[in-house]
Image (spheres, rainbow, N blue to C red):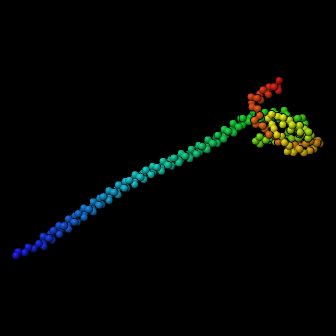
Amino acid sequence: MIRINLLPHREEKRKERRSQFYVTAGLMFAFGAAVWLSVHVFNARDIDQQDARNGYFKSEIAALDREIEEIKDLRGQIDRLLARKQVIETLQSNRAETVHLFNELAARLPSGVFITTMSQSGNKITLKGYAQSNARVSSLMSSLNDSPVLEGSEVVKSVAETLSNRRVYNFEINVYIEKSTTPNDETAAPAATTQKG
């Protein structure tokens, strides 16, 4: 019987399979490294692009915030201008009323009554002065109540004093402007014409 020694052949096959395994493992490692590197580069590129987008959004948001602050400043300026305009319109609308009020007070002031101070707070007018008697103060109040412009006169005080060796009454009266019946420029002009005629 002939015996064939197959050991060298098997050893060569083992070496060949081992070398194929190493080559395959190396190729798989290289392939895995290439895939990892490509994924890493792709992700890094996406992150950079997203960072660029975020930076753009941040800059645009900052610009919008500045514009919002400018709009708030403009709104504040507009509100201040509107408030000034309202004050001017109020002053213009009250201009004729003030003139007519002075005319009305001068026309309704009885003799023997002297007004030293007149102040206004809203529609309340405070008159301070001197009168020769309490009857003159009552006459002034009655005359003011008969006015179409004024209403609700009330005595705050009426005190007897001596002024320059004369007995006088120091008085303070509150009277209210009737806004609904206050004449405007158009009705005040005919009244002035009637008085002149």
Give how far across and how far down residue 157 sits, in percent.
87, 45
**Would you place residue 121 above or below residue 30 in this image?**
above
All told, the count of numbered labels is 0
Residue 18 falls in image quadrant:
bottom left
**Left or right: 20 as drawn, with respect to 82:** left
Q: Residue at x 86, y 41 (%)?
A: 129
Give how far across and how far down residue 13 sits, in percent.
15, 68
Q: Is residue 160 visible?
A: yes
Q: Residue at x 83, y 23 (%)?
A: 197
**Left or right: 45 as drawn, with respect to 7:** right
Outermost residue, top side? 197
Which of these two is toward me, 118 or 165?
118
Outermost residue, bottom side? 1
Give how far across and how far down residue 42 sits, in percent.
35, 54
Q: Is residue 164 visible?
A: no
**Would you place residue 21 above or below residue 87 in this image?**
below
The N terminus, quarter of image: bottom left
Q: Residue at x 74, y 30 (%)?
A: 185
Q: Residue at x 29, y 58 (%)?
A: 34
Outermost residue, right side? 165
Outermost residue, front side? 1
Give how far across and how far down residue 96 sits, in percent.
75, 33
**Would you place residue 74 above or below residue 49 in this image?**
above
Residue 105 falls in image quadrant:
top right
